[in-house]
Image (spheres, rainbow, N blue to C red):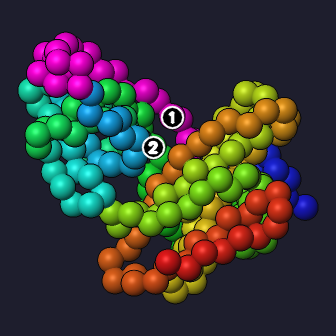
Amino acid sequence: MPTRSAIMKLLFNSLLLMLCLVGCVPGDDDEKDGNYPPLCTDMLCVAIAEDGTLNTVLLDNGEQYDVSAQKLTSDARDTILRCRAAYTLSEGRLKLHSIVHVFSDKAYPADAFYMVVDGVAIHDTRFIPRDPVKLISMWKSGGYINLHLGIMTTGNGVHSYAFCRDSEGAYSLVHQRPQEDAESYTEHLYLSMPIPQGEEHPSFTVYTYDGIYTKTF
């Protein structure tokens, strides 16, 4: 029988890496006067130049802002990252206060996942890891299905995640817990799956401690 230690294809380590933001941003006039715009925390996309400078921010409502003057940089190069950020908006300007990379990848068909047992690749949807999570919230925005999860962990080992396309318009979370990790405390995790073009009402399924939960958008 296949074991949980068997190799899984297309599982990705969810490493929530804080992007290294450096540089100083001049204070706004509102801040000098003691009037602070509300702090927003949300999912968004960040365009990063070849030199690592953050160029633009695209909100899920379609609004785009130039943030190059803030002199913020990251370890990533020449790419667009899905992130969870804290920011303020004032007089048409967006100011970033913190930003964290969020795991985001396309969904793979169920038959793309396999396990290797005794040197033989076995394609069987029953063996796709569905270790349970706490589903805190799930929502659709900006062409993405976003997840806020609670992961039970002790911090031992690395959990792996992927998105699975189970059938036409139906998607689900793939989650594998490392054998050495026990369920001691809850760690918050955000994931974001881009919705394929043409999908008007996709559904997404999460295996939770309370059972299987499916939401159609």
The reply to whether residue 65 is visible in this rendering is yes
- The secondary structure type at the circle numbered 1 is loop
Observer able to see residue 79 = no
Quadrant of the rendered image containing residue 130:
bottom right
Q: Is residue 181 left or right of residue 110?
A: right
Q: Position of residue 122 (x, y in %)?
A: 73, 67
> Can you tell which quarter of the image residue 60 is in?
bottom left
Q: Which residue is found at the position 11% from the left and 43% from the top?
A: 92
Span of residues in magenta: 12-35
Residue 88 or 199: which is nearer the viewer?
A: 88
Relative placement, left or right, of 198 versus 130 is left
At 76% from the left edge and 60% from the top edge, which residue is drawn? 208
Residue 102: mark in rendering: 2
The residue beneath circle 1 is: 16
x 75%, y 45%: residue:
177
- Asked if residue 125 is positioned above or below residue 82 in the image, the reply reads below
Q: Amino acid at mark 2?
A: Val
